[in-house]
């Protein structure tokens, strides 16, 4: 991989002039787990045209790169990162409600006329029609979208009340909780393909499945339209509060983490003809398997499997590093494989 100065030279002055550029960044500060080394180069495109130009320049120069959202599902390597990291920050957090005519040409709206989320001009269309289309850019905070839409009596994003991700990361991961997910509310998404071609994809084309979508590495979720139902604001806010309350009780939220470590196994056959566990039918959740192989509370360096929720790894000491995360994940996967014959699949993304 070329060094950062060489990469900037390859991208060229015109492309670079449209980016906020940072060199040698403490990358752990960009993630919720807060472990890992330094990022050699961080690029933040100032607008949509800048992002397209950047994507095309990466492609033309055959350069590897990655996009980071809010960093709430990613663990950086301790050795750091030579590939440029793209962040959708600043203007990329905007969202606005769609009127009939704006729906016809959202792509044009990406460039101009967007209203910052939460500003006084974020007002609902006057008609009482439901559902309401909410267009948000890829860097918008899911928590903010959930909070602001609930205040306005729009239902659909209550599940996202405690998910500290961006809309782009949420679409890529098909994030979800409390029986819902992004796929339930998403109408369509604008995805920038490698090389700068913008595609408009609906839910079927995004092939949503449990914690996954068809968004591939090198593709960028630029914006998405969500469909939210009108309800009493009090009801929507009460549902959000219930979601947050459940999290407080079951998740170790005061520690840095990246949320659930492994996906919950799906469609496992009954074990020797018997139910897996008495608490419920079907496949056992990952926390149960990790608990049963003795890893609840297990610590390596500055990282532990949470006592409260054994499928969460938490940072418990400042010296925590990505190698501790890798070690504990490998250990859990090995023990669960040997004890139960179940292959745990990571939900956390290890870079
Ligand atoms: C306290 C806590 C609670 C959590 N609870 C939940 C939960 O209930 N349910 C759940 O599903 N997850 C949960 N998570 C995990 C995480 O918040 C979600 O996976 C979230 O969707 C990740 O979004 P992000 O912007 O942080 O993505 P990142 O972590 O930044 O990136 C994740 C992946 O998405 C890609 N990506 C990011 N932005 C874009 C973009 N614009 N276009 C294309 N690709 C992109 C990245 O390259 C990477 O591959 C939790 C995490 C924490 C720390």
Image: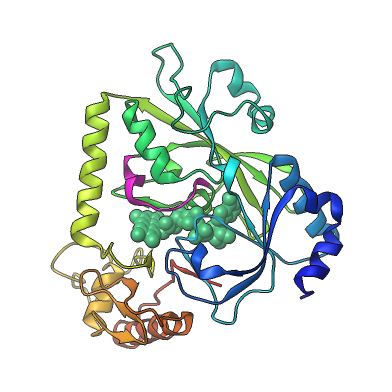
Residue 231 to residue 326: above or below: above
Main SS type for the magenta part? helix
Classify residue 90 by image quadrant.
top right
Which residue: 22% across, 42% down? 241
Task: Point out the stretch of residues depicted in magenta.
Answer: 158-167
Residue 287 percent location from the top left of the image? 27, 71
User: Relative to 329, does residue 214 appear above or below in the rendering?
Assistant: above
In the picture, measured across the screen, residue 351 lies left or right of residue 43, that is left
* Picture residue at 28% right of the left edge, 49% below the top: 178
Residue 208 belongs to the span the image colors magenta = no
Instruction: Please count the marks in the image.
Output: 0
Q: Quarter of the image for the N terminus: give it.
A: bottom right
Can you give x and y, in whole percent of width and height, for residue 71 in the image? 50, 60
Q: Quadrant of the C terminus?
A: bottom right
Residue at position x 36%, y 26% in the image: 229
Q: Can residue 231 be seen from the camera position used here?
A: yes
Of 65 and 229, which appears nearest the observer? 65
Q: Residue furthest left?
A: 278
Quadrant of the image occupied by residue 288 = bottom left
Q: Of residues 123 and 129, which is closer to you in this image?
A: 123
The answer to whether 204 appears left or right of 150 in the picture is right
Residue 110 shown left or right of residue 124 in the figure: right
Q: Is residue 221 left or right of residue 59?
A: left
Q: Is residue 164 magenta?
A: yes
Question: Image point 49% across, 55% down: which residue?
Answer: 70
x then y, percent, for residue 244? 25, 49
* Residue 195 shows in the view: no
Find residue 7 and report its image quarter. Answer: bottom right
């Amino acid at each position: 991989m070329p060094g950062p100065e060489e990469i900037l030279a390859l991208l060229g002055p015109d492309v670079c002039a449209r980016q906020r550029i940072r060199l040698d960044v403490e990358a752990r500060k960009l993630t919720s787990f807060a472990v890992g080394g330094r990022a050699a180069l961080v690029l933040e495109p100032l607008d949509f045209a800048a992002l397209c130009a950047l994507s095309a320049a990466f492609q033309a120069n055959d350069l590897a790169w990655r996009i980071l959202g809010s960093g709430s599902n990613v663990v950086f390597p301790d050795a750091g990162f030579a590939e440029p990291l793209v962040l959708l920050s600043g203007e990329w957090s905007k969202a606005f409600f769609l009127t009939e005519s704006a729906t016809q040409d959202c792509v044009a709206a990406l460039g101009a006329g967007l209203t910052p989320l939460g500003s006084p001009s974020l007002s609902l269309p006057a008609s009482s029609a439901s559902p309401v289309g909410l267009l948000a850019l890829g860097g918008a905070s899911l928590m903010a979208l959930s909070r602001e839409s609930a205040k306005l009596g729009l239902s659909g994003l209550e599940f996202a009340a405690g998910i500290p991700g961006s809309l782009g990361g949420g679409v890529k991961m098909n994030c979800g909780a409390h029986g819902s997910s992004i796929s339930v509310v998403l109408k369509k998404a604008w995805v920038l393909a490698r090389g700068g071609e913008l595609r408009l994809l609906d839910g079927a084309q995004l092939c949503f499945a449990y914690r996954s979508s068809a968004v591939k590495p090198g593709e960028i979720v630029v914006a998405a339209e969500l469909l939210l139902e009108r309800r009493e604001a009090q009801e929507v806010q009460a549902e959000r509060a219930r979601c947050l309350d459940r999290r407080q009780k079951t998740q170790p939220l005061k520690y840095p983490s990246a949320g659930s470590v492994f996906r919950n196994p799906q469609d496992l056959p009954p074990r020797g003809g018997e139910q897996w566990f008495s608490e419920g039918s079907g496949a056992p959740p990952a926390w149960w398997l990790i608990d049963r192989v003795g890893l609840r509370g297990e610590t390596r360096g500055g990282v532990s499997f949470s006592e409260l929720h054994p499928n969460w790894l938490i940072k418990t000491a400042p010296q925590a590093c990505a190698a501790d995360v890798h070690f504990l994940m490998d250990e859990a996967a090995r023990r669960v494989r040997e004890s139960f014959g179940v292959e745990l699949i990571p939900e956390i993304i290890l870079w």
